[in-house]
Structures are given as C-alpha cells and as structure tokens.
Image (tube, rainbow, N blue to C red):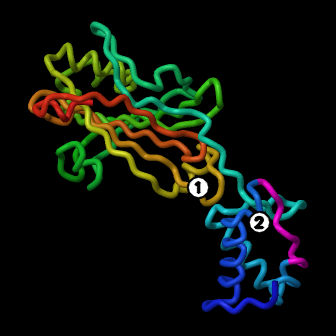
Amino acid sequence: MGEIQRPGALYQQVAAEIRSSIAAGEYKPGAPLPSEAQLIERYKVSRPTVRKAIAALRAEGLIEVIHGKGSYVRALPAPAVTIERTITRSGKTFRTGHHAWQQVEEPAIYRTKTTAATGALLGLGEGEALFGVDRLLTDPDTGTRALHRVLIPFATADQAEQLAQAPDTEPEQIYAILTAAGHKLTWHESVSARMPLPDERSTLDTPDATPILHTARVTLGNEDCPLILEELRASADRAQLGYRITADSPRQLRAV
C-alpha cells in the first residue's frame, strides 16, 4: 500500500489503516503485525508516527505489545466464567451464584459513609454511616478474580444485632437474618461497564484497555426499603453475568 491520504493527524491515519486491516481479517486474532520497519515502508511515515499509531491501537485494546517479540492482534476469547446472579432459596437457606467462590484473603471490615452514588441506591443522603466489608474472591476452576463489597447502613444493623457485631457475615446469611427479622426480601440490580481504577486493574489482573463489569445489587425489605448494597467487580475479559428470568405478576416485578 502506498502513502496514506486520510484526514487527521498522521499517526491517526496509520492507526485507522491498521484498524481497517484488522476488521477486514488481513491480520487475524493472535497474529503478529508487520514490524516497525515494514509499517514504515508500507505507509511511508516515520518511526515515531508508527509508534504513536501502535500506542493508540494498544490503548483501544485492539493489539498487545509483547516485549522483545513485537505487536500482536489481540485475541478476544469467550469469558472464562459465567457468574450466575440469580438468588435461590430453600427453606431458610439462601444461595447466590458465587457462593462456591473462594476467599483469597480475610475480609476487610471498616466503617465508611455513603457517597452520592451509594446513598442514592440506599435511599440515604450523602455522608450517612455504613459498615463496609470488602472481599477478594477467586473462582476455583478458572482462577478468575472478583471484588465483592457489602455496605450495611447502621439503621439496618440496628435491626439485626448480629450484623452490628459481625458485619462480615456472608451475604447469604445476611439474607436469612433479615428474613428472620420480619422482612420479605426482594432485590434490584444494575450492571455497568467502566475502565478500572489502578488498584482494581492490578488486583483483578485486567489487561490494558479492558473494562470491568460493575454490578450494584440492593436488597430491599418491607415496603421496598433498601437494607444493604452489594457491589461486584470483575474483569470483562474473564467473566460474564448470567441471570435466570421469570415472569412475575405486575405487583412483583421488582423481585429478582
């Protein structure tokens, strides 16, 4: 191919040409890109321009650079594990889709306050007192990691003395405790994707330019009163979410 003539900065033109070649199947997933010298010759540009183009494509997640070997088209395999988000109940026992996951380390227990985002989900103002519990989980079959957080308002802990004494009670047991306290539980969950924070990227072993899945599950008690908030974060290249959907009557549509 001769000299490129697309609009925009020169490195963006080179990146666009390589991107088009990837989309057209000229460069297959897992295959190496041409060397810097070959790209310079192909597009009639300087070495810094080629390097900026490669950096841009790497930031997009289209390629990965292996030190000492070169640039490769990034393969996008199916996620290693499906995290089932359905909650099941048998008698007084609750189960979640990740109850069999293993804890990498002891839970971190702390006191915190609601933010604008968590307060809105819990029906509280910003700055309200909470118990926080963070867990690092791993799937024993695939090694996939997930960060799980439980936020318990003090008002909820006041209703169940066990939660005030042991905020790190497992979520399934929290559901049982709240049910025993007289609540008929339902759940509401939202899912979003975002780029990870540096500590999340390191802990979850997330590759460059890869988003994480972020779920926010609110446990609701009587009269749809929010009781606790759970957040789950996992690398989007390693995990996908699964849901069991049933048809409920209109008055029960909030139940999951």
Asked if residue 213 lies in the magenta stretch, the reply is no
Q: Which of the marked residues, 2 or 1, is nearer the chain's N terminus?
A: 2
Q: At label 2, which amino acid type do we have?
A: Glu
User: Pointer 1: what residue?
Assistant: 210
Q: At label 1, which amino acid type do we have?
A: Thr
Side of 162 relative to 155 (left or right): right
In this view, 132 is above or below 248: below
Question: Residue at image x 36%, y 34%?
Answer: 150
Q: Which residues are magenta?
A: 30-38
x and y percentages locating residue 157 in the rendered image: 23, 27
In this view, 190 is above or below 143: below
| Quadrant including the C terminus | top left
| Residue contact at pointers 2 and 1, CB within 8 angstroms | no
- The nearer-to-camera label among 2 and 1 is 2
Front residue of 251/105: it is: 251
Side of 19 relative to 134 (left or right): right
Say which mark, if any, is on residue 26. Answer: 2
Q: Secondary structure at mark 2?
A: loop
x and y percentages locating residue 124 in the rendered image: 18, 46
Cα separation, mark 2 vs mark 1, equals: 23 Å
| Quadrant including the N terminus | bottom right
x and y percentages locating residue 8 in the rendered image: 61, 90
x and y percentages locating residue 130 in the rendered image: 28, 39
Question: Residue at image x 72%, y 63%?
Answer: 25
Question: Residue at image x 66%, y 65%?
Answer: 23
